[in-house]
Image (cartoon, rainbow, N blue to C red):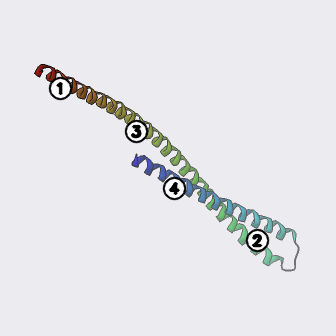
Amino acid sequence: EKMVERREHDIVMREKELTMLREELDSVKKTLTDKARIIEMEKDTPSPKQEQKENRLRVWEEELRVQEDSMNHAEAELKEREERVEERQKELKERFREVSDEQARCEKRKRGLEQGRQDLLDGDSRLGEARSKVEE
């Protein structure tokens, strides 16, 4: 049971980690969207410093590409972790079922032993009564 509880705790911790990664991905996506919006506004805004803006835009676009690559990698890693968590959950469910079955077998055996004990006590009591009658 402790092993199952430990495994369940591990799953909960992994789920928390996955949630944190999802939140981080959402933050990166928002940043990318914001930067893309700024880039579009910059492209549409004429200025005497157009060359500087274009250079800055190229830098931002490169940053966006790097962040998109990073986000894609993080999404792939997240998906892989989710699959591992699902597989582990299946394993734990199977193990929990095995433990539950074993526990049921033990309870049945315990009831049988208790009944056997009671039968022995009843037999001992009857033997004592029989001895008393014989002595009388």
Residue position for label 4: 13
Between discs 3 and 1, the one toward the N terminus: 3
Q: Are marks 3 and 1 in contact (CB under 8 Å)?
A: no
Residue 67's disc is none
Residue 99's disc is 3
Between discs 2 and 4, the one toward the N terminus: 4
Between the residue at mark 3 and the residue at mark 1, the CA separation in whole angstroms equals 43 Å
Q: Residues within 10 Å of mark 3 (few under 14, many from 20)?
A: some
Between discs 1 and 4, the one toward the N terminus: 4
Question: Could you say which quadrant of the image residue 119 lies in?
Answer: top left
Residue 57's disc is 2
Q: Are marks 1 and 4 in contact (CB under 8 Å)?
A: no
Identity of the residue drawn at 70% across and 60% down: 29
Q: Callout 4: helix, strand or loop?
A: helix
- 99 or 60, which is in the foreground? 99
The residue type indicated by label 2 comes to Leu
Q: Residues within 10 Å of mark 1 (few under 14, many from 20)?
A: few
